[in-house]
Each structure stands twice: as structure tokens, then as C-alpha cells.
Image (tube, grey):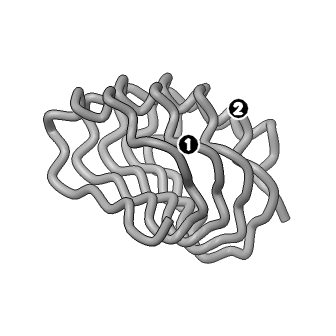
Amino acid sequence: GSIPDTIDNLNQVQQLDLGGNQLSGSIPDTIGNLTQLVSMLLRHNGLSGSIPDSIGNLTLLQTLRLDSNQLSGSIPDAIGILTQLVSMELNFNQLSGNIPDAIGNLTQLEALDLGFN
């Protein structure tokens, strides 16, 4: 299955864990409407496409795990808006390009894993 565009109806959700479910398709732009999210775990699926710029709307996010998917493209500059991030794991994907300068804004970051891309 895939993550439906209507996921934004869950606008009070603070923790989203869809890890290890063999999900396919892309991460919908509407994920950026889940502005109460503190933790987003989409790891160990078959998600493809790029990380949507709308991820920058998730300003309360502390944990972001998109590891072990098939995500491609570059890490969006919008990542730099997520100044509450403590842990970000984007390893084991197919990401390319430069690490954005905006990553330097993540001054709370304690764990960063970009390996195997």
C-alpha cells in the first residue's frame, strides 16, 4: 500500500510510526499538514521519490527516521527549518547531491545518519 494524501486529516497526531510495513509510492506533500508531529518514523519501507519540501512545516519534529527506503533526489533545504530535531536518520536510501547548508541550523541535533546513499 501507500501513504494516502488524506493523512493530513490526522492533524492532532504527535507520533506517526509506519515503519516496516512494505509501503510504496512517495511521501505525500500533505504530510506537511501534520504540524503537531513530534516523531515521524517511516523507516524500513519501499518509499520512493523525493523528500517533500512540505516537511519544513513540521516545526515541532524532534525525530525523523526515513531510513531504509528508496528515497531519491537531494535533501531539501526545508530540513533546516526543523530546529527542534534531535535525531535524523536518512541512511540506506538513494539520496544524492550536496548536504544542504541549512542543516547547520539544526543546533539541537544529537544523531545524524546519512550513510549508504
Residue 69, image quadrant: bottom right
* Location of residue 64 in the rendering, given as x and y in whole percent from the top left corner: 41, 51
Between 12 and 38, which is closer to the camera in this rendering? 38
Tell me the residue at 45%/27% (across/down). Answer: 77
Image quarter hosting the N terminus: bottom right
* Location of residue 29 in the rendering, given as x and y in whole percent from the top left corner: 70, 32
Element carrying mark 2: helix
Please tell me whether residue 74 is drawn above or below residue 88 in the rendered image.
above
The mark tally for this picture is 2
The residue type indicated by label 1 comes to Ser
Q: CA distance from mark 1 to mark 2?
A: 16 Å
Tell me the residue at 45%/58% (across/down). Answer: 90
Please tell me whether residue 32 is drawn above or below residue 27 in the rendered image.
above
Badge nearest the viewer, 1 or 2: 1
Q: Would residue 107 appear left or right of 79 to someone viewing this image?
A: left
* Location of residue 15 in the rendering, given as x and y in whole percent from the top left corner: 45, 50
Please tell me whether residue 26 is drawn above or below residue 6 in the rendered image.
below
- Earlier sequence position, callout 1 versus callout 2: 2
| Residue 11 in view in this figure | no
Between 80 and 108, which is closer to the camera in this rendering? 80
Identify residue for label 1: 74
Q: Would residue 49 appear left or right of 74 to someone viewing this image?
A: right
Element carrying mark 1: loop
Query: Given the current orientation, which residue lies at the most extreme right position?
Result: 1
Tell me the residue at 70%/61% (across/down). Answer: 47
**Mark drawn on residue 16:** none
Q: Would residue 105 appear left or right of 92 to someone viewing this image?
A: left
Query: Given the current orientation, which residue lies at the most extreme front position?
Result: 97
Identify residue for label 2: 29
